[in-house]
Amino acid sequence: MSSKPSSIELADAASELMKGVAGWLLIGLGVAGLLSGSGGIVQQAGTADIIAPVLVVGFAILFIISGVLVNPRFRRRLDRRHRPSRFGRVKTVENRTRSATEGRREPCVVCGSRSKEGPVRRYRQEYVVAGVPLWTISEKHNFYCPDCALAELSGYSTGSTDESDTAKRTITETE
Ligand SMILES: [Zn+2]
């Protein structure tokens, strides 16, 4: 957590919160519509009036989808989705670079010296359904000082042993 959030960060956080609330409202409306609409379909089954509940269900599904898309938390998950054929536990390794502007000091995992900037390697184990990470099983991150990063990470690009099970991506932007 940053110690002094600027007004821009506050505005970002506020808009993210609003989008989250809007997203959940849409999902709530969608679920309510889905329930009443499908109840209507059962009641009106076989009659000409079935068009109305079918429309309600159609809009309800649209509401739920847009609710998911507008929600920043879901968006982030969708952004790091895997192939749609992936189910179960998936391990990912993300590399990103921490810049000095983030104001955090952390000991390097190799030499222990504290540094403000350097690469962070994040190991994440997630439960994935149809490629979308639903929940995080475990997460840890290793921070490297620039000196050790050169030595440690240079051998990394040549490929690791469990290539097939580990999705690799490089994230350069800060979260
Ligand atoms: Zn180091």
Image (spheres, rainbow, N blue to C red):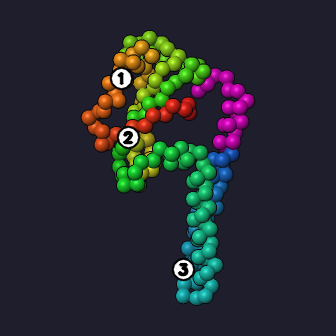
In the structure shown, which secondary structural element does the residue marked by tag 2 occupy? strand
Q: Quadrant of the N terminus?
A: top right
Task: Please tell me whether mark 1 or mark 2 is closer to you in this view.
Answer: 1
Residue 38 vertical position relative to residue 145 in the rendered view, above or below: below
Measured as percent of width and height from the top left, residue 28 is found at 62, 58
Q: Would residue 35 be counted in the magenta stretch?
A: no
Q: Disc 3 versus disc 1: distance between alpha carbons? A: 62 Å
Most distant residue in the left direction: 161
Q: Amino acid at mark 2?
A: Ala
Q: Main secondary structure of the magenta part?
A: helix
Q: Nearer the viewer, residue 168 or 72?
A: 168
Question: Is any part of residue 36 visible from this angle?
Answer: no
User: Which comes before the other along the chain, label 3 or label 1?
Assistant: 3
Q: Quadrant of the C terminus?
A: top right
Q: Disc 2 versus disc 3: distance between alpha carbons? A: 45 Å
Q: Residue at x 57, y 65 (%)?
A: 61
Give the extent of the magenta segment. 1-17
Which numbered marker is on residue 26? none
Q: Residue at x 54, y 84 (%)?
A: 45
Residue 155 vertical position relative to residue 59 in the rendered view, above or below: above
Measured as percent of width and height from the top left, residue 85 is found at 36, 55
What residue is shown with label 2? 167
What residue is shown with label 1? 154
User: Which comes before the other along the chain, label 1 or label 2?
Assistant: 1
- Say which quarter of the image contains residue 141: top left
Cβ of mark 3 under 8 A from ligand 1: no
Q: Would residue 14 be counted in the magenta stretch?
A: yes
**Number of numbered discs present?**
3
